[in-house]
Image (cartoon, rainbow, N blue to C red):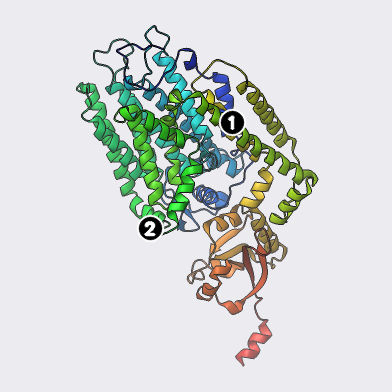
Amino acid sequence: MQFSASSAPTPAIVTQAAARRLPRLVLLLLGLAYVLPGLLGRDPWRNADLVSFGAMLDMARWNGMGSGQWLQPQVLGQAAELPGWLPYWLGALAIQGLPFLPADIAARIPFGLLLVLTLVATWYAAYHLARLPAAQPVSFAFGGEAKPVDYARALADTALLALVASMGLALLAHESGPSGAQLAFVALLLYACARLARGVLRPAGGAGDAAPRVAWSTAAVWWVATVGLALSGAPWLGMALGLGWLVWMFPARHASEASHWGVWLLCLTGTVIAASLAWHLGMPDRLAAWSDVAALDDPDRPRRYGQLLLWFTWPAGPLALWTLWRWRRSLRSAHVLLPSWFVLCGVVSAWVLGASDRALLMALPALACLGAFALPTLRRSITALVDWFALLFFTGGAIIIWVMWLAMQTGVPAKPAANIAKLVPSFEPSFTLAALLPALLATAAWLGLMAWRMGRHKPAVWKSLVLSAAGTTLCWLLLMTLWLPLLNHGLGQAPISERIAALVRGQQTPGGAECVLAHGLTQSQIVGLQFHGELAVVRAQPSAQAAAGGDLQCQWLVVEPAAFSTLRNVVDLPEWALESRVPRLRENRDALLVFQRKPSPAAPELAAETD
């Protein structure tokens, strides 16, 4: 194949036929199949998901037991584990505004919309990066190369597929908490940076396929993204990403127009104001408390970090590395440098915070955009290898999920059924047609997609990532339908919370308050007692008796065994009797100690003691 002598030194070779876009209906159905599972029917799971939900309940004054502190997200008087304000506000407002829905589903709706925003912003960021002059494919001597708009749409579809295919995205992006909000605003900031770069770096003279002038709406998007990051608990990330890109854009050519400088200054002002806002709202103290979990002298960190990078970023991570190699002569070009800067900030944050998957989550939109530029440079043998890996891996995963579901329902095969009964002895499987039908439809769609991919069709840039994205979506949907009751039981606090609530209500003393004291419990355990057990929980502390008599009214005390040695510092031990040891799942694993207050001595006995 011959190329024109004037073509730019680019490794991308894309024909017009290969630049056709993915059908919009297919893209829409894939997005719905990815976003909706995990939002509907799923209980808040332990740790960050349940804690964030508990802080939202506290703000919304759920059942009148919340504090209503909108500037201090908390669980029973202690600051929520993950910093931020905006995510908790969104969840609390949804709970208040949708009283006809269960509180956990209502709180999750804003985060489903934020996940949609993440996908849309990533698509448009890749689109604007692909429209840059330096990102264009090779021009053929006799024509037939991809048109800029079609090429950009094809690469944007590829970036979206790479993001959906990323294994680390599914669980964290479906949680109701700061991580999902931070991810959405990082993707939005990436879009604003790409749009700013395309407007400033348009070809001189503005002829042909030149990009439009920098719009003031770019600054508005920038403000929303940086302020959203600051209010979601990551002001430092917004500062690093935004200021780093603005510094690079400062000496950019063709940026002498007044509108360019005005938008540049407005973006800079928005970044500084967002960080100042977070500072005045007390973010430094919250970030210091959050970062304490990262032990800087942990010798096991390199191994954990390497494993995290390997599985969390697949397949976008390896594709991004290939992009850096093949586009190594264009590393200073915006379409490579911008996503590389976002990825660098994400991976460094993950390392500093002790191999944190939540910090690495912020790098996924940029990794997807960077990895998209690898597809026009891959050989057919490499793309075939990626397809076969996805085909075997996700088909095997789907088969395992189906076999385990059949074992739960019928007891056959016997060995998987015995393993489930051993791991979760108190779980009772249930059958619902509403869970089976989506799983059957998704499996049938996967079989049809495999048949399509193994057939002979016209080449497309995004073709080699279809199986990876669809396979990830298939397995996520199967887990959130067929396995959802098992996962709710095994990963949630409902089983132990409901058992403790039944014990409290079954032996409630006449006139006693239906509340429990808590000592040594994690925030997740406390929220479980409040939400699943529907109990009023009071934190046991020396001043509890003076605080409106709350300690005197509670007849029950729930203690974490690891904190039993300090129990005498907050309560008078002779007044309490151990009633039960309640395991979460299995008898030989983690459990909670439940104490009941001893009845008061009879009046004659008290009189005798006085004499």
The answer, for residue 444, to whether it is visible in the render is yes
Q: Residue 604: horizontal and vertical position, in percent? A: 68, 86
The residue indicated by pointer 1 is: 388
Numbered badge on residue 473? none
Q: Is residue 213 above or below residue 33?
A: above
Task: Inspect the image, locate mark 1, and give the three-letter code of the amino acid beneath it.
Answer: Trp
In the image shown, does 451 or 96 lie closer to the viewer? 451
Direction top: furthest residue = 142
Marks counted in the figure total 2
- Whole-number angstrom distance, CA of label 1 to CA of label 2: 40 Å
Q: Decide which of tag 1 and tag 2 comes sooner along the chain.
A: 2
Q: Residue at x 42, y 59 (%)?
A: 299
**Of labels 1 and 2, the one closer to you:** 1
In the image shown, does 327 or 420 lie closer to the viewer? 327
Q: Residue 525: horizontal and vertical position, in percent? A: 57, 58
Circle 1 — which element? helix
**Left or right, 406 with reference to 598:** right
Q: Residue 531: horizontal and vertical position, in percent? A: 60, 52
Task: Inspect the image, locate mark 2, and give the three-letter code of the amino acid beneath it.
Answer: Leu
The residue indicated by pointer 2 is: 296
The answer, for residue 482, to whether it is visible in the render is no
The part of the image, by quadrant, that contains residue 30 is: top right
In the image shown, does 196 or 506 lie closer to the viewer? 196
Quarter of the picture holding the C terminus: bottom right
Circle 2 — which element? loop
In the image shown, does 36 or 365 lie closer to the viewer? 365
Quarter of the picture holding the N terminus: top left
Q: Residue at x 71, y 51 (%)?
A: 420
**Left or right, 211 with reference to 536:** left
